[in-house]
Image (spheres, rainbow, N blue to C red):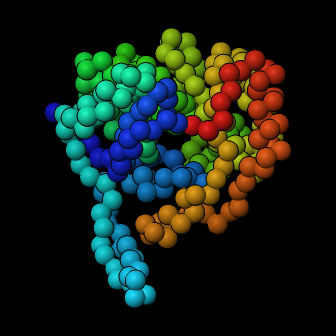
Amino acid sequence: MATGYIFDIKRFSVHDGPGIRTTVFFMGCPLRCKWCHNPESRLMEPFQYIKSITLSSGESIYETKTLGYKITAKDLMKEILEDKAYFDNSGGGVTFSGGEPLKQPEFLKECLQLCYVNGIHTTLDTSGYAEWAIFQDILNNIDLILYDIKSLHKHRQYTGADIKLIRSNLEKLAGSGVKLQIRIPLIAEVNGNEIDEFIEYFLRVGVKSIALLPYHNLAKNKGERFGLQLTKEKFSCPTEFLDNCILKFKQAGFQVSVGG
């Protein structure tokens, strides 16, 4: 029985695939995106942090907390099955996110197999940064892949990793028959001048479903909370920029959604 490390299970999610979903967040990520909304997922194993609690008296106390835990695929499946009625009634299922689920390939594979046996729709939310053999080993048990593309030209600068492997895997997935949706975090300072190239590239690859994810800074306090060093660079997604991106993708014939 495979075991893995996760740091959260989010129930009743409606932004990570079709229907009502349970999203499982895996620990570990090969990228270091400077705007990361889940920086606590970077480490492969649970870690401790100090949580400050302010009492009604105004006094602060401090507790040591642990983020993340080890779990077997079988035990995770028991938790997932608690929500199966919601999946069946809404056309939903399970989304494996992170972090990067492909960093724990054997655990992910067994989770997907158990979902398949139990008739549960599966979605993989991935950066695409993994060896092609890992994708090949799990494709038969995946119904939908949410594939993140951050930048075509500044990927290494803002994520710490080259985009060559990510593009290669996307092109192979597009020819595999698996259902794909591209997810682009819209950040004016990172990919604001790449929209036309995105459109040209995705048309060439043959993927027509696009989710545009406007940048937000809701994770800005996570660095301090978890003792992680995050960038101080300023990022944004102005309304005019978002509206222009939506218009361009729609005019090019893409199915466009905004948000997860």
78 displayed left or right of 154? left
- Relative to 53, residue 123 above or below: above
173 displayed left or right of 115? right
Decide which of 175, 187 is in the foreground and name it.
Answer: 187
- At x 75% / y 17%, what residue is drawn? 253
Instruction: Estimate the x, y position of residue 173 in percent, counting from the top left.
Output: 52, 19
Which picture quadrant has residue 11? top left
Which picture quadrant has residue 183? top right
114 displayed left or right of 59? left
Decide which of 29, 76 is in the foreground and name it.
Answer: 76
Instruction: Estimate the x, y position of residue 21 in percent, counting from the top left.
Output: 41, 33
- At x 29% / y 63%, what residue is drawn? 66
The quarter of the rendered structure image containing the C terminus is top right
The quarter of the rendered structure image containing the N terminus is top left
Instruction: Estimate the x, y position of residue 69 in percent, counting from the top left.
Output: 26, 52
Instruction: Estimate the x, y position of residue 249 in percent, counting from the top left.
Output: 76, 26
